[in-house]
Amino acid sequence: MTPSLLSDLRAALESKRAELRGPKREDIEITKWADPIDQSQADQLREQADGEANRVDGHLKAINEALARMKAGEYGICEECGEEIPEKRLRAVPWARRCVACQEEMEKR
C-alpha cells in the first residue's frame, strides 16, 4: 500500500470518526404527567435513539480498530485469509477487516 493511499484512508477514517462523534441525541424526558399515549410514543423514540446510539458506537469501534491496525502496520490485510484487501474495497469501506470474499463467507455463516 502506498503512503499516499494510506494517508487518504487515514483521513477518511478520521473524518468519519469526527462526523460520528458530532452532536449527540438529547435524552427524551418524560414528565410524571404524561398520558399513556405520550408515554408510549416517548418509549418508542427512546428505543429508536438507543438503537441508533448502539449503531454509532459499533461504527466508532470499527473505525478506531482500523486506525489501530494502521498504527501497528496491519491495516489492509484480511483477518481471515491474510491477503491484501483491494484498494477499491478500502476506499468504499476504510474500516473493512476482511476482503469481499471472506466477508461474504462470514455473512453466510
Image (tube, rainbow, N blue to C red):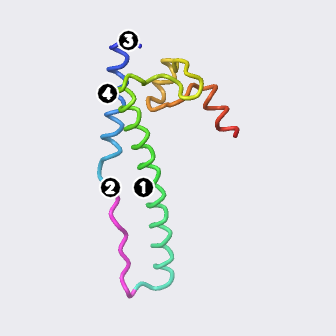
Residue in front for this viewpoint, 39 or 10:
10
Sequence-wise first label, 3 or 1: 3
Give the residue number, with chain letter if any, for mark 2: 24
- Span of residues in magenta: 24-33
* Residue 28 position within the rendered picture, expressed as x and y whole percent measured from the top left: 37, 70
Does residue 26 show up magenta in the picture?
A: yes
Sequence-wise first label, 1 or 2: 2
* Residue 66 position within the rendered picture, expressed as x and y whole percent measured from the top left: 41, 32
Give the residue number, with chain letter if any, for mark 1: 53
Main SS, magenta region, reads loop
Residue 30, picture quadrant: bottom left
Residue 104 tag number: none
For the point 44% across and 39% down, the residue is 62
Sequence-wise first label, 1 or 4: 4
SS label for mark 3:
loop
Three-letter code for the amino acid on which mark 1 is drawn? Ala
Give the residue number, with chain letter if any, for mark 4: 11
Give the residue number, with chain letter if any, for mark 3: 2
For the point 41% across and 43% down, the residue is 61
Three-letter code for the amino acid on which mark 2 is drawn? Lys
